Amino acid sequence: MLKRFHILLFAWMLVPTGMLAQANADPYVREADRYYQQMAYARAVQLYRTAAELGAVNEHVTKRLADCSMRLGDTQEAERWYSVVVKFLNREPEDLYNYAEALKSNGRYEEAEQWMDRYLEVVSGDGPVQRSNLTGYARKFNLDKDRFSVRPVSCNTPYSDMAATWLGKDRVIFSSSRHETRTIERRAAWNNQPFLDLYEAEVTPTGDLINPRLLEGSVNTKWHEGPATASNSGDVIWFTRNNYYKGRTRRSQKGINRLAIFKADRRSGGYVESEQFLFNNSEVSIAHPALSPSGRKLYFVSDMPGGLGGTDIYVCEDQGGQWGEPVNLGPAINTPHDEAYPFIGADGTLYFASNGHPGLGGFDIFMATRGTEGAVIGAMNLGAPINSPKDDFAFIIDPLNQRGFFTSNRPGGAGDDDIYAFEMRAPLEERYLCSGMVIDDEHEMPAPDVEVLLMDENGKVMERATTDSKGEFTFPVKKSSTYKLVARMKGRYDGEQFVNTEGIERRQIITRDIHLVPDAGIWLRGFLREKDGPGFIEGAKVSVVNLSTFHTDARTTGEGGDFAFRLQGNEEFEVLIEKPGYFSMSVPASTIGMRQGIIDLGTARDLELEPIEQGRAIAFKHIRWAHEGAQLDPQAKAELDLLAERLSVNPGITIEVAVHSDARGDQKKQTELTQQRAEAIAAYLRGKGVPKDRVRAKGYGATRLMNHCAPGVQCSEEEHAVNRRSEYAVVSVQP
């Protein structure tokens, strides 16, 4: 939700009281555009509304009204105007996305999913169309609501109260725009609220916040202050403010006063600003500081160039009194959208807010634990009731991982942003899901009341489900596992899909649709895997050639590596499987004597594509040489037949056949013998139709040993055998 972005990029100004009075809409639009460019959205939206009332309900005005409303957190108005925007003939894909986000922020997940799926269909191009599965995520994140109890704190006001941070065990610092008596009341042009100041409050034994008061000292100014972070002792705080230092305001080349981080030390009269953060820059925003428990790392948020998009989270490490260069936390945490409000728990867990990871709407709160090498990994959504369709952010938790606070603008609060207290009643545990839809291809409709089985790789049934009225199903799954889905319906062949959950930490839900076809006719199907890899290959081209008519039908494999074709009876076929960067594969298929049924191509050949890596040696598994001989036995010839077929299907590949010996005996004779053996392999391949210029033969003797068994070194027979090998490697690939 862009509203939360108001603490990242602002153009602050006093709100004027006058208003242009024109008879037509154009002057209002021009004035509104000027305010919009200055990010004065509260002022701009008023003028755009006036223009719309005067009849300017065009694409430009409605888009700006929708965008301003979204930035101001008025998602109902945003939904209203985006519903108009998406009806324009020249709408852009981003309009569909924004409308879906507005619907999601209002809790209308089914409608949001429809529009997000339309967006994904437009942007997918020639690739496979993805599904957003927003309703699935909504169900997932609403599981286990009893893990937390949540309640608003006593010190909330109708103004913005946000981003509490620990100041010792029994106090917090937070930001608030609550009205304070001043000589001149300044308001943010972004949302027409008073500027934020830093406040202090007491934490009661029950976890409430009471007795709020302005933070003592000289930290608060005429600009925005907050959020902040404090050292364990509370003697030092780092805080966010508009780039205003020692009485001087700094603006970018475009005149925008961005955010910066400053340090303040506690003295007898309160906190006194002492220095600015080393990496403050008037051209970008640097904000949301968060100290690690040791105080040696400072996390922050920025829109600096080189990030993944929007605002990203960075970290600097103390290098002897000076902060080291910022390091982006990478794609496990940051997305092309906005990440903000980091907090580091006592156990090193990172908590942060994001509108780029799957969530319930607006900003959601996530946690990320640390891997074995110390890097943060994954992003787990904390789910409801911590998260809601609105903006939820600024999560902090005590060292015992029992209580804490977060901020939300959800309905039912005192107004605008409010601080909520929570108590954790059960440990956080990630749940991963596999969901999908069963589709009856005969009628091109979802199939309700269909049994779906979740099986492991060995065919053991793990779970059973029945599709709902929309033909949908959901199963819990574990990470780094492989499953088979089977759907069964009377009058249809069983439908199958495969799922591998490697990397599911990022997606959290894997979607697989299962298609059912009438149990008539002959169907060819299969599932394509990567050789020696855990997953299935998406986007491979599968062509089925009728060897009588040479008619060709082609498909592209889906996310589960799946493909299916309907075949004519009493025919012979060749199935060609291709994907750039992999060895192509050809597999025969026959319907001779068949009237109906399923041909599973995987029973005829392991449907595994092997990546092409130039220079990587691929060992022959079945070539064995008689003592001082260079003859190929039948088992060796059978293996070379497969290589000849591979080279025939991959005409652009040139290989080198290499034969090696161990280091015993006369090395000159060994080199000559390995050359004879390599040439014997090459000659056999030529006899199978492989052109001479595509196979190089090289006998290396003992010049490329795999271990320490050099001439004169005592080794076991097993150690010497490691060096006696025959192999080939790709040396060039032509298109």
Image: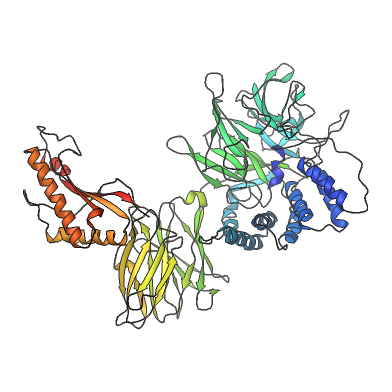
Q: Nearer the viewer, residue 688 or 585?
A: 688
Left or right: 227 as drawn, with respect to 602: right
Image point 46% across, 74% down: which residue? 516
In x, y percent, where is residue 294?
A: 54, 26
In x, y percent, where is residue 491?
A: 45, 81
Q: Quadrant of residue 261?
A: top right
- Badge count: 0
In x, y percent, where is residue 77?
A: 77, 55
Is 433 situated above or below 3?
A: below
Q: Nearer the viewer, residue 61 or 645?
A: 645
Is 429 situated above or below 587?
A: above
Quadrant (top left, top right, bottom left, bottom right) of the C terminus: bottom left
Of all residues, the one furthest to the front in this rendering is 693
Q: How is the image coloured?
A: rainbow
Q: Nearer the viewer, residue 266 or 624?
A: 624
User: Would you say residue 528 is visible in this rendering?
Assistant: yes
Left or right: 316 as drawn, with respect to 637: right
Left or right: 361 as drawn, with respect to 296: right
In x, y percent, where is residue 140?
A: 56, 56
Image point 10% across, 44% down: which residue? 672
Image point 88% across, 38% down: which residue? 16
